[in-house]
Image: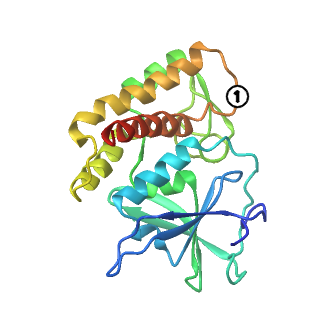
């Protein structure tokens, strides 16, 4: 058990499927209140497609963050200062905090989704629809309000407006299917996943709810995660 570097509460451990010469689970420490994940020894790269999708579903089911993030963090293993690190996965830039002694890495939920290529910028057409219907959202990175009528990025932290990328999720499903698992085909699911996300966004606007879930990434992860759970449950019958 380790304590969250942000709120100091005990983080919840999860065991996810991992690659290795001798396959063994990847232990992920989670703090839903801060939306943070801790991976010992940079173990996020050892997650199998099944492990990635399982953690994606966990993120989609998490409640809104209840704690603001600090500007710096100490390693939960050695208590040294974590370094803010920029990295590149394929064509996606993402960031995280890394222990200088290589004890592990700290990521927000959104940073993990970016590392796995599950986040993208909305297309001009999608952005136009959002501006016509949703109008105001919360920044997926810092929680500050974004007025879509005039902004396409957070004026507080600079993070651009982002959505869950159905193609990225479908690619993970394809990779999982390649291992022999019975899961929905990737190409057939992209449109359905995208529709589930947009429908969830529009439902939020129609219901006139004004809550902390007006976060496009959180809404998309919840909607697509629910679709994945329904498909997997059906495939196990």
- Between 28 and 162, the one nearer to me in the picture: 28
Outermost residue to the front: 237
- Quadrant location of residue 6? bottom right
Residue drawn at the location 45% of the way across and 19% of the way down: 129
Residue 134 in sight here? no
Applied colour scheme: rainbow
- Quadrant location of residue 90? bottom left
Horizontally, residue 1 falls left or right of residue 19, namely right
Residue 85 in sight here? yes
Residue drawn at the location 45% of the way across and 52% of the way down: 54
Image quadrant occupied by the N terminus: bottom right
Outermost residue to the right: 8
Which residue is under mark 1?
211
| Position in image of residue 88 (x %, y %) | 40, 63
The relative height of residue 157 versus residue 124 in the rendered view (above or below) is below
Total number of numbered discs in the rendering: 1
The relative height of residue 184 versus residue 86 in the rendered view (above or below) is above
| Position in image of residue 137 (x %, y %) | 61, 30
| Position in image of residue 131 (x %, y %) | 52, 21
Residue drawn at the location 49% of the way across and 74% of the way down: 42
The relative height of residue 21 versus residue 169 in the rendered view (above or below) is below
Judging from the image, what secondary structure is the residue with disc 1 in? loop
- Between 7 and 156, the one nearer to me in the picture: 7
The relative height of residue 100 versus residue 9 in the rendered view (above or below) is below
Mark 1 residue crowding within 10 angstroms, few (<14) / some (14–19) / many (20+): few
| Position in image of residue 237 (x %, y %) | 33, 38
């Amino acid at each position: 058990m380790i304590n969250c570097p942000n709120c100091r509460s005990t983080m919840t451990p999860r065991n996810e499927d991992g690659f290795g010469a001798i396959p063994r689970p990847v232990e992920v420490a989670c703090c839903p209140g801060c939306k943070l994940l801790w991976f010992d020894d940079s173990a996020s790269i050892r997650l199998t497609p099944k492990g990635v999708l399982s953690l994606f579903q966990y993120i989609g089911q998490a409640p809104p963050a209840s704690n603001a993030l600090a500007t710096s963090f100490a390693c939960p293993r050695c208590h040294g200062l974590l370094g803010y690190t920029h990295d590149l996965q394929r064509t996606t830039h993402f960031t995280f905090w890394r222990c200088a002694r290589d004890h592990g890495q700290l990521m927000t939920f959104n940073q993990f989704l970016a590392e796995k290529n599950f986040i993208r910028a909305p297309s001009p057409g999608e952005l136009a629809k959002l501006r016509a219907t949703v109008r105001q959202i919360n920044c997926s990175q810092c929680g500050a309000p974004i007025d879509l009528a005039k902004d396409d990025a957070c004026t507080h932290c600079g993070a651009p407006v982002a959505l869950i990328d159905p193609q990225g999720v479908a690619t993970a499903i394809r990779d999982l299917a390649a291992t022999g698992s019975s899961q929905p085909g990737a190409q057939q699911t992209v449109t359905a996943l995208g529709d589930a996300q947009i429908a969830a966004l529009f439902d939020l606007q129609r219901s006139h709810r004004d809550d902390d879930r007006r976060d496009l990434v959180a809404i998309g992860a919840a909607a697509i995660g629910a679709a994945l759970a329904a498909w997997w449950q059906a495939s196990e019958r």
